[in-house]
Amino acid sequence: MKTFKTLVILRCPHLVLWATMRDYLPEFASRLPEIESVTQTDRKIGEGGQTHIVNEWRSSYHLPTSVRSIIGIAGFGWTDRNCWDERTHVCQWTIEPYAMAEHVLCQGQTKFEPAMAGQGTRVTLEGSLELKAGFLRKAIAAEAIVAPILESAVATVIPKSLRSTLEAAATFANQPSKTL
């Protein structure tokens, strides 16, 4: 299992950034590099100020041929299931890739806090990724070598992607014509 943690500070009030990430992700996702689309497929308001959302992500990122042949997939797509807690400003999430979902456990939380005397947001992401046995199907003997490499690569990509997503959300929220 590989854990990861990152901190991002942006000039956008935390309640604005929180609401933008929760409520407008499909609208600004096309501004993200290598993301074709994000579609919200489910949204439920729960008790105690929690909003449960399911998003389907389509990526235009192309895997190298060597990686595609080893893991048997052509591209990326995933479902994220998240719970936004209005009281704590913490979003609990899981990511389920379209391919190999039964072999991947990726989960974590993203916390939004005020920064810069209320003019900014401090976002802390913490998560973990685990590749379960059998993910290579055709080359099970190679899993012990490949798993740590893939876990490290993905654990690097997720924080980087969060930063890009937060920056796009802040830009979207700070547009003069946008009222959130």
Image: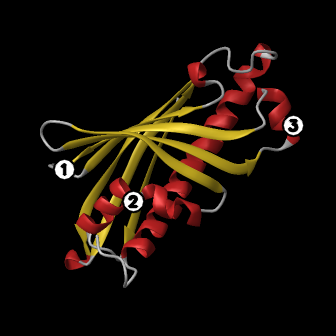
Q: Residues within 10 Å of mark 3 (few under 14, many from 20)?
A: few
* Front label number (3 vs 2): 2
Q: Residues within 10 Å of mark 1 (few under 14, many from 20)?
A: some
Marker disc for residue 63: none
Residue on which disc 1 sits:
86
Instruction: Identify the amino acid type marked 3.
Output: Ser
Q: Is residue 113 above or below residue 67?
A: below
* N-terminal label among 1 and 3: 3
Residue on which disc 2 sits:
24
* Mark 3–mark 2 distance (CA, rounded to whole Å): 36 Å
Badge 2 vs badge 1, beta-carbon distance below 8 Å? no
Which one is in front, 104 or 31?
Answer: 31
* Mark 1–mark 3 distance (CA, rounded to whole Å): 44 Å
Badge 3 vs badge 2, beta-carbon distance below 8 Å? no
Q: Secondary structure at mark 1?
A: loop
* N-terminal label among 3 and 2: 2
Q: Secondary structure at mark 3?
A: helix
Instruction: Identify the amino acid type marked 1.
Output: Glu
* Front label number (2 vs 1): 2
* Mark 2–mark 1 distance (CA, rounded to whole Å): 16 Å
Q: Residue at x 28, y 70 (%)?
A: 180
Using residue 86 as the reference point, say whether residue 97 is left or right of it: right
Residue on which disc 3 sits:
66
